[in-house]
Amino acid sequence: MSPKGHEDRIHGSKYPLINRFQEYLGEFVYGGIDGSVTTFAVVAGAAGATLDSAVVIILGFANLIADGFAMSVGSYLSTKSEKENYKKHENIEYWEVEHLPEKEKEEIRDIYRAKGFEGEILEQIVDTITADKDRWVDVMMKEELEMSEETKSPWAMGGVTFLSFLLFGFIPLLVYVLDYLKLMSADSPLFLYSSILTGLVFMLIGYLKAIVTQTKVIRSMLETFFLGAAAAGLAYLVGDVLEGLFS
């Protein structure tokens, strides 16, 4: 399927919920990737060190809250900075249009001359664009500075990141919480159950990532799964080695 066809499917009725929250889906996916991978790495490291459920829960929730909050703050500040940077350059363009109109008009002429327009048509384009100050500045922002205004809310971006981190990051801890609450049998293979649940989460996130990046679904799912498994395997190995050194 062509990228255009894939895009039509995303924005069409096949994904009504995704269509509604499309602009925040990418942040939701990447927050989920970090949440599930880092928390499962903590769980794997604790399992390698043969720590009990209470310790796994403490370490896991400490990671969830601290790392989730740090990620959400980073997302908030990044989006806020983009909006402020755009506004700063936009104000500069308004000043130049107001105080240096001939220079700015010549820049518009140069931009569209480079696109192949000339003669009377070129002058009509220049006159049409420069007749409206807002349109003039908008063209300068897009064509000269190659900047587009950030429409997403910094607060929403931070909130989506934090929520996604908590939601997906909690899954690796679920069986340990159930075990601590005495809702699992005493001989349950907790790390195995956690691994299975987390593996399913990795596959789900890989599927969502394929929608965001418009790549092949199976490839994205397997890529996310194996990267998460590699991180967990490394954490398990470190935990096992350290437990052997200090026990």
Image (tube, rainbow, N blue to C red):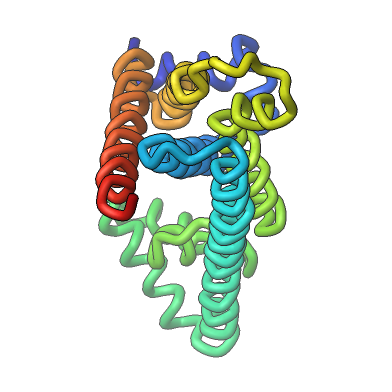
Q: Residue at x 32, y 54 (%)?
A: 246
Q: Residue at x 34, y 44 (%)?
A: 239
- Quarter of the image where one finds residue 150: bottom right
Q: Nearer the viewer, residue 225 or 29?
A: 225
Q: Is residue 7 visible?
A: no
Q: Residue at x 49, y 18 (%)?
A: 189
Q: Nearer the viewer, residue 84 or 238?
A: 238
Q: Residue at x 55, y 70 (%)?
A: 81
Which residue reaches farthest bottom?
A: 99
Q: Position of residue 217 (x, y in %)?
A: 38, 16
Residue 139 against residue 166 in the figure, above or below: below
Q: Is residue 16 left or right of residue 126?
A: right
Q: Is residue 106 visible?
A: yes
Q: Nearer the viewer, residue 181 or 19?
A: 181
Q: Nearer the viewer, residue 150 or 216?
A: 216
Q: Position of residue 168 (x, y in %)?
A: 58, 33
Residue 10 against residue 27 in the figure, above or below: above
- The N terminus sits in image quarter: top left
